[in-house]
Amino acid sequence: MPARLVRFPWLPALLSLAFAAVLAQAQPVREPSLLPADTLSRAAIPLDGPWKFHLGDDPAWAVPSCDDSAWEQLTADRPWGQQGYASYAGFAWYRLNLTIAPGQNDPPPLALLVPHVDNAYEIYWNGALVGQNGKLPPYPVYYLASQPPQVFGLGPARSGVLAFRVWKAPLLSDDTGQGGGFLGPPMAGSPDAIDLRITVLDYQWLRSRQFYFALNSLYALVALLSLLAWLRDRSQWPLFWMAGFALAPVISVLFYGLRLPWPLAVANGLWQPLSSLRDISLWFLLVWLLELRDNPGLVRLIRVCAWANFISTTLDAVPSLIDWIPGWTLTAQIADAVFTGVYVLLASLPVALVAVAVLRRRRLHPSRWVVAIFAFLAGMVQIAEGVAPQGRRFTHWTLADKIEAPLFTVNGNSVSIFAITGTLLLVAIVYAVYRSSDDDRRRQSAMEQEFRSARELQQVLIPETLPALPGFSVTSAYLPAQEVGGDFFQIIPMDGTAEGSTLVVLGDVSGKGLKAAMAVSFIVGAVRALANLVPSPAQLLTELNRRLCDRLQGGFATCLVLRVGAQGQCVVASAGHPAPFVNGREINLPGAFPLGLIPEALYDETAFQLKVGQHCALYTDGLLEARSPAGELFGYERLWKLLAGRPSAAKAAEAAVQFGQDDDITVVTLTRTPAVAESPALQAAQQAG
């Protein structure tokens, strides 16, 4: 043995390796994936590669004899974007040689289990097309990443070449550029082994979605109960908006959470407009809960933003419909970025509403401030979630990955920061709306008690039976538009007057409810106290006005005082009240201020004679201002025609109600009858008149 070889015993081994490397480079050897036949019948075997990979598209690459020795090698456990082909979109091919190793028994038929491939693909087995998922260009159709694994039959088990023709859709503004192609290795096995593997995968999927389904079940329950509660009481708008807020995530489950075979363009096109439901509902909820409804400008801004949100989210689905069309890719990417920018800008609205409530220093219940806090947090997360992914394939920022990554895992269920803030916001809203609705019920109960008290007071103030007036036929009607109105009238015989006069007082207090009833009570009490002390209608109004100033808390009252003598002699004074009609003709009265506005106001009197058979009608403006469903007023022309027919008070009021009552209606009529003997001088004067 030569001494050199003895001194360097490793030299022969080194030369052998070098010679082998030269041979391998000169004549590359394909290393096929070996599939033991006995194993195929028992379990699914992952085809993790390495796979031969080539960009571009050529139908000849499906043929087994295609020379793929110069192709790159990639694994199937990651997309090509993570293996040196970031941001590539278009066609690419995968090829893998499969060798079925003989076993003790005949090999079973061969089946293939394929996880989601980004985005659409065709499968060739020994050059023959055996299956596809979606459609490739020129008219591509591709499915959501949540699509379950697909199964394809390859026929009798035999060795051959498996080829995937894959198409990746053009990238949009939030795409990482790290996708494309295989997201996980396909698996080969017998049909029974593949079925077993699918069962395992389905179980793992369901187990990992427990928290997701539980949370959305809670959303569905809240949406249903809120909607039912709102249908019972349509005035409770917070319940309506809470139903919309809770319903949106439930709808999203139908598109993205149930592994339904939705084409991505269809799912986005349907979901995008509906996705605005959650944002819009949250905005109006915050306006209600933070008591910002008294700002008309802010409410109008919210409405404008609601329409902008709906339109922008709807249009944001368009880029995924046209990005694959040659010449439109760049336009679609720009449009996607613009619409996303509008969405992100509007997503900051909850934060702005909370800021407005803080600056206005609203004294709110703590439950509403809790909503504000969680709305602020959820809004900030939503802004970050919308902004961070934009252009990340250029910036390489990792913030979006951190936001999307789970904070922790419980029993195989990933919990993200978005899920936590959304859940906390939902719970806070439910509690705040419950408290708000409970407060509303209490206020409603208090109002009902107030109306009952006002009604009892009103029953005392409005005469149920009219006093007898010799020589006159008197009728009255009182129809409040609400349970308690502000109209009043009194008929008071005046004691100690030689002519046996009677005061007819009719008026209308501004406002409704107990406040109006209390004002009416004060006026009626004052009228009864002053009637026999101040027989002059004008002086009576002056005294009433002096007592009412600074007592009506910014309100006022119109009033008409008519003094009627037994022989038909009448004196009337008005404080801003409609003039009476005699035989269908309005008496001309001077203008005057209503009661309770100006302490120094003075009032004038007008005298007229009511002859036998003549009809005098006094009314409140509810008769004149009755409004039809079309918005048309009853008006003076109809009033003149109505009163020209000398109707009773009930018929006059009923005519206005049938036309369309819009306010309280009070009518009093007096018709002179010949029941009382008149002096010869008066009879002569009447005949001469």
Image (tube, rainbow, N blue to C red):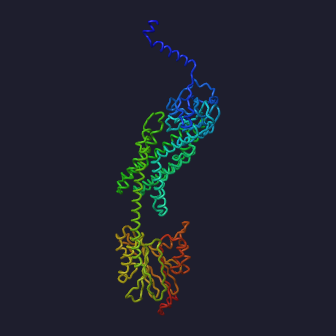
- Picture residue at 37% right of the left edge, 53% below the top: 370
* In front of the other: 294 or 588: 294
Q: Is residue 467 above or below residue 104?
A: below
Residue 409 horizontal/vertical position (percent): 41, 43
- Picture residue at 51% right of the left edge, 41% below the top: 338
Return the residue found at the far front.
104
Residue 556 horizontal/vertical position (percent): 40, 70
Residue 426 horizontal/vertical position (percent): 42, 52
Count of marks placed on residues: 0
* In front of the other: 656 or 585: 656
Return the residue found at the far top.
2
Residue 549 horizontal/vertical position (percent): 35, 71
* In front of the other: 381 or 459: 381
Q: Quadrant of residue 437?
A: bottom left
Q: Is residue 95 visible?
A: no
- Picture residue at 37% right of the left edge, 50% below the top: 373
Q: Is residue 526 above or below residue 2?
A: below
Q: Quadrant of residue 124?
A: top right
Q: Is residue 166 visible?
A: yes
Q: Is residue 177 above or below residue 288?
A: above
Q: Is residue 7 left or right of residue 181?
A: left
Q: Is residue 527 left or right of residue 262?
A: left
- Picture residue at 45% right of the left edge, 42% below the top: 385
